[in-house]
Image (spheres, rainbow, N blue to C red):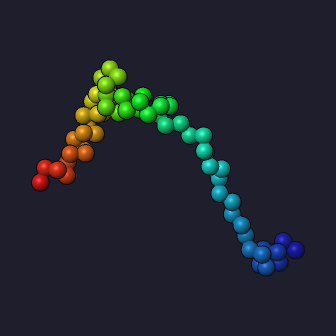
Amino acid sequence: MDIEKIITEGIVFKGCRSSNGKKENGIKTKAKKKSFITGSHGSGSAKMKAEYRQRRANRHKNG
């Protein structure tokens, strides 16, 4: 019975659940996100990351 059903209807594979409630770095407002990205909130590591991001963004402008 099962094999006939598979042959006639096929097999349906269902995907996993999507996580719609995903947080973005735990930052909720655009203003806080902006200060985090630019490194202006005082964290040394954020300032370092901001410097790397700036270098990456300006990489194509050198030539």
* Image vertical order of residue 54 relative to residue 18, above or below: above
Answer left or right for 52 relative to 35. Answer: left
Q: Compared to 51, does 4 lie above or below?
A: below
Q: Is residue 59 left or right of residue 41?
A: left
Q: Quadrant of the C terminus?
A: bottom left
- Taking depth in this image into account, of 38 and 15 the one nearest to the observer is 38
Res. 13 image quadrant: bottom right
Query: Can the viewer see residue 43 in this picture?
Result: no
In the image, what residue occupies the spot 60% across and 44% down? 20
Residue at the outermost front position: 31
For the point 44% across and 34% down, which residue is it?
30
Percent position of residue 41, x then y: 35, 22
Q: Residue at x 87, y 74 (%)?
A: 1
Toward the right, the furthest residue is 1
* Residue 3 in picture, x, y percent from top left: 81, 75
Residue 52, position as x, y percentages in the image: 26, 37
Quadrant hosting residue 57: top left
From the viewer's perspective, tell me whether residue 63 is left or right of residue 3. Answer: left
Residue 62 seen by the camera: yes
Q: Is residue 49 left or right of residue 31?
A: left
